Structures are given as structure tokens and as C-alpha cells.
Amino acid sequence: MSTEGITKTMHTTTKSPTLHPRLSSAIGRRAFIHRVAAGGAAAALLPRGVVSAAPAERVNLACCGIGHRGLDDVRSLHATGQANIVALCDTDIGAPHTRAVLEMFPDVPRFTDFRKMFDALGRSIDAVSVAVPDFSHFPIAMLAMAQGKHVYCEKPMAHSFRQISLMMAAEKKYNVAGQMGNQGHSQANYFQFKAWVEAGIIRNVTRITAFMNSPRRWHGMDVSGYLPKQPLPETLDWDSWLSSAAFHDYNVGYVNGDWRSWFDFGNGALGDWGAHLIDTAHEFLSLGLPTEIDPVMLEGHNRFIFPQASTLAFRFPARGPLPPVELTWYDGQQNLPPLPEGMGDDDEEDNKDLPPAPENKPAKKKSKPGKVIYGEGLTFTGGSHGRTLRIIPQEKGDEMAASLPEVPESPSDHYLNFLRACRGEEKCRSSFAVAGPLCQTMALGVIAQRVNAKLAFDPVTGQITNHKEANEFLAGVPPRPGWEEFYNL
């Protein structure tokens, strides 16, 4: 069959009927085990440290989620010249937000269900990009890794603390490259922070302030339950969209980014932006997991959607010679953090990655996301993603400029770093082993927002010790019948 014939066949056979609450019998336990075994047998035979793609080859990449953020990921991965796009998967294939990628790759097979994609093309896939809603990262990534495929997964890694743990374990078990999509982890801030810690410029940090005060989708929403059922769009495979989440009737208020508003689907402002603001501090200060998460202030607490504003204090214990750290997170348009004197205005370049403000409501100048790091003798301020730190006040920074260590250039952006890691040429800078504890810290913050209570967490046992309901949320919502197997890979 020609490539064109394959494309047409896949496109016309992948739309699944809505199956509430069970999946079709074709995705039963026996078929599931066969799927994993067929894709992963060869990878399981590889010695540790050896990956499947030869160094001179392009990586055969399947892209799950091709609209919105997925559009940027597909374009960026393809632009490296190191990836062959061999499959496209989106639960809303053909919807307006997917058409740009479909037009870029008109002859590539298309799917609405990632399981059917692996069934049809699994042996020809080396790696998978995952740019779908937070709650459905986990099953795609787990099935891919179990088949020995490398995974580029947007942030946060997964929706629950337990899912993140399982993804970290799978990355190690199946000896694959996992990269979380916090792109700044391959940009200037990463290399600067690392160099300044190693040189002792950043030392004995005791306080960190991080803030994201731009408008969010749920700001102004007032809900007392889930949304009413609406007719399904013709292009949308709703059963595949829900994946392992608890069943909800379709409503447009859940899709195309609005899922971020809901505890059942997203991780709020913290999960969305924390990975861009606190990632380098978390890694290079060896923060690990907090022992206390305190919702100092929640405005508009709601059991269904995220608060209108939050102040969360994460308290990390001493780590060897490193002192305890209190990291305070601020979100909400008016919930501005206290900032040190001499901070001044950030460069306009720091606005680059801000989401657009609602129509007729321009974002305030002080709403740019950022952070302040209080170390021994020095205070640092910075923006999001790859924005570098400044020593404040400016006079102090100018005085030290000549003695600061040289910061190396990045050898590869985040996408090229991942593809080179697939070929064994580099290591992922935001591997699941590195990104996992950061995402688990954020997941603990989301639980504190959800239950509106101060939490005591034991990093050794991985349990919340003072709040039964919060402890149960560590595991996330039980998967729908038929989706349990992804937790057993």
C-alpha cells in the first residue's frame, strides 16, 4: 500500500465511538499485554546505556497532540532536521487548531487514539512527543516507554504524584530518554545558575519567591459543579480525549486549554508555570521534596476549579550542609508578592513568554512572571524560562561583574538535546529523573489548593501524614475501567 493509501486508511478508521464508561474489548488486558510485548521486546534486550537509534540516523518521531502547544513542539522538533515525523495523533484531528500540522505533513498517517497508533506503527517509531492535556500525559508516556520508545513530554510530567513516580521508574526501567518540555532548561538561565552555584556565587539560599500574576482562564469563573452535557463536535474522539480520567460529559468548557481550570484535568498556574520559574533553583539547590506545604492564602477556594489567587509556602529541610529553604509561590492578578528594594523593572524581553491578556484588559507591567532568590550575602532576581538572573541592587551586580564566572553557551536547544539523547549523544537536561521531584513538589501544592489545608509530607514514605483526603489525592483519581494497565507497566 502506498503512503497515501495508509494515510487515508488511518484517518478513516481511527475515530472511536464514545464508550461510557468502558473501552472496547479490543483494548482488553490480553491485547494490551500483546501491544506492549510487541513494541518493547527488542528494547528490553538492549544493554543499559544503549539506545535504539544509530547515531547517524534521524529519529522516527510520532507526535501526540498537534494543536495549541503541540503545534509549537512539532514545528520545533522538525526544525532541528534530526526527526522524521512518522505519525500524527490528536483526539480532535481535523479541528481548526490541528490543520497547520496536517498541512505540513499531508502524507503522514493520522490517528485519534494513541493506542491504535502504536498497534499500527509501533515498530517504526523511535520516540514520541506528548503535548496533550496534563491528565493524559501519563498513559501515552507509559505505553511508549514500555515499548522502549523515548518520550518528549510537555510540563508538568503528569497529573498526580503517583503518576510522576511511575514515569520516573519507567524511564530507568526501560532505559529510555525522557525530556520534560520546560524549554528554559536548555537555555541561558540553566547554564548560568549551574555555573554560579558551582562558583559559590549562589550559596546558602534560605528563601525563594516565585510569582505568576497574569490572567488565567478560570479567573472570574464561579462554578458549583461540573459543566452540562453538550453535543460532541464531529471531529472529536471524546473517549480518547478523556483517556484514563474519570468520565465527564463533553462540554466545550473542558477542551482547547480550558481544561487547565479544572482540578480533574489540569494543574493550575503552578503546574503550568512553576516548571519555568523554579526549575533551576530546584535542581541546582538540590531541593528535593518539601516536608510542609502551607496554603497561606487562597482566594475563591473551590472544589472544582483552581482558586482565583493563591499564596503557597513550600518548606524544604536542610540537605547536608545546605540550609532549609522556604519557597513561596504567588498567583492571582492582584496577589503580588513583596519584592526587595532595588529590584527595578525587568527588561521588556521578559514579556516574551507571557500569555496574551484578555481582550480590552492589558496585562499590568508588574504581572510578568518572575522569581527572587535570597542567598548568603546576595539577592538575585530573574524571569521565566531561560531568562538569566541579575544581582540586585544593580550597583552590587556592576561591582561583581568582572569576577563572575564565565557561563558556557548551550550546545543544543531543548528539542535538539532530546533528539541527540535518543541517539545516545547527549543526556536530557530535564530528564524525568530531574524533572520528577520538581513536578511532585508542584503536585503537592495543587493538593494543598484542592483541600485548602496545611499539609505535612514525609519524603521517605511518600505520604501526607496529617490529612487523609489529601493523602488519597497523591494517587490521583482511579483510572476508568480498561485503563488500569498503564499503572502496571
Image: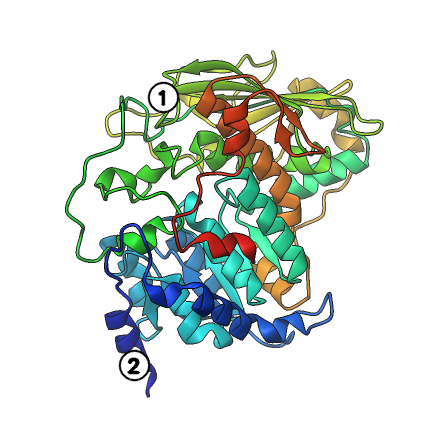
Crowdedness of circle 1 by 10 Å Cα count: few (<14), some, many (20+)? many
Q: Distance between the residues labelled 1 and 2?
A: 49 Å
In this rendered view, identify the residue nearer to me: 259 or 450. 450
Q: How many labels does the image show?
A: 2
- Using residue 13 as the reference point, say whether residue 445 is left or right of it: right
What's the residue type where badge 2 is placed? Answer: Glu
> Quarter-wise, where is residue 40 in the image?
bottom right
| Cβ atoms under marks 1 and 2 closer than 8 Å | no
Position above or below: 392 against 1: above
Residue bearing the label numbered 1: 302
Position above or below: 138 against 276: below
User: Residue at position x 45%, y 63% from top?
Assistant: 29
In this rendered view, identify the residue nearer to me: 307 or 469. 469
Q: Give the label on residue 150, or none.
A: none
Residue 18 in the image: state x and y as whole percent.
24, 55
Residue 281 in the image: state x and y as whole percent.
66, 33
Residue 342 visible somewhere in the drawing: yes
Crowdedness of circle 2 by 10 Å Cα count: few (<14), some, many (20+)? few
In this rendered view, identify the residue nearer to me: 238 or 179. 238
User: Residue at position x 29%, y 67% from top?
Assistant: 14
- Using residue 22 as the reference point, say whether residue 208 is left or right of it: right
In this rendered view, identify the residue nearer to me: 213 or 171. 171
Numbered disc 1: secondary structure: loop
User: Residue at position x 61%, y 14% from top?
Assistant: 342
Label 1 vs 2, first from the N-terminus: 2
Give the number of the mark in front: 1 or 2: 1
Numbered disc 2: secondary structure: helix
User: Residue at position x 22%, y 41% from top?
Assistant: 251
Residue bearing the label numbered 2: 4
The residue positioned farthest toward the bottom in the image shown: 1
What's the residue type where badge 1 is placed? Answer: Asn
